Image (spheres, grey):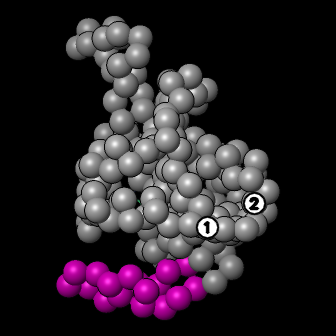
Amino acid sequence: MVERSAPSDAPMANDGIRLQGVTFAHCALLARLHGLCFEDGWNSATVAQVLRLAGAFGLLATIPEHHRDGGPVTFDAQTPIGFALVAGVLDERELLSLGVVPAYRRRGAASALIEGVVERVRGEGVTRLFLEVAEDNDEARRLYASLGFEQIGRRPGYYSRRNEPAVAALTLARPL
Ligand SMILES: CC(C)(COP(=O)(O)OP(=O)(O)OC[C@H]1O[C@@H](n2cnc3c(N)ncnc32)[C@H](O)[C@@H]1OP(=O)(O)O)[C@@H](O)C(=O)NCCC(=O)NCCS
């Protein structure tokens, strides 16, 4: 189920990063962010389709906007920098997509998003969060390892690549 309203008073994570639940009104924004993070970006319709899956929800990471002199624009002005999309039923959820735009990486946004997901699904009785990551995606694999995910499977040739051989998907899981 997708949250219908975005909490404005969500707790701050590292570096002023805030997390909020997404609504269908965020589909175009999420598609834009997705396109900045992945070679084959999703369009708004695909994002909406994902948000209609059983148990689906999304989190958006933002940071406060700043003037060129470094001062805040207004207290509430926020720049979207990353997202997590999740779905699943019963006691398992899958992290379907996660991305942070290049200019804002290595500030803890992805870690904050995953911990935000974990916090939310724990409250729903979920006991395991899993995901798939391309075997050659070293950044993401380091991120997931640092957050306690372990490999539970491997699917050879799962991700096709332009002008390169297909790459295996690793299935990772984290018990909650
Ligand atoms: C993978 C991705 C989500 C990481 O986002 P991020 O906000 O930069 O990650 P964090 O800042 O939370 O990183 C947490 C830890 O992950 C590891 N990590 C993340 N990016 C890394 C990189 N480029 N090189 C080495 N380690 C990295 C580090 O251990 C890092 O901790 P540190 O910065 O204290 O060393 C981001 O690079 C991205 O959007 N990539 C493109 C899309 C993608 O691959 N998504 C995942 C698909 S499964």
Q: Main secondary structure of the magenta part?
A: strand
Can you identify the residue that label 2 sits on? Answer: 126
Q: Is residue 139 visible?
A: no
Name the residue: 29% across, 45% down. Answer: 29
Instruction: Find the residue positioned furthest to the front.
Output: 4
Name the residue: 38% across, 48% down. Answer: 24
Mark 1 C-beta to ligand 1 under 8 Å: no
Q: Is residue 150 above or below residue 145?
A: below
Across the whole image, how many numbered discs are drawn on residues?
A: 2
Cα distance, mark 1 to mark 2? 10 Å
The residue stretch that appears in magenta: 154-170
Mark 2 belongs to which amino acid?
Val
Q: Is residue 119 visible?
A: yes
Q: Position of residue 75 (x, y in %)?
A: 41, 11
The quarter of the picture where the N terminus appears is: bottom right
Q: Position of residue 10 (x, y in %)?
A: 58, 28
Which quadrant of the view contains residue 89? bottom right
Can you identify the residue that label 1 sits on? Answer: 88
Q: Earlier in the sequence, mark 1 or mark 2?
A: 1
The residue tagged with tag 2: helix, strand or loop? loop
Mark 1 belongs to which amino acid?
Gly
Which quadrant of the view contains residue 43? bottom left
Q: Position of residue 38 (x, y in %)?
A: 31, 62
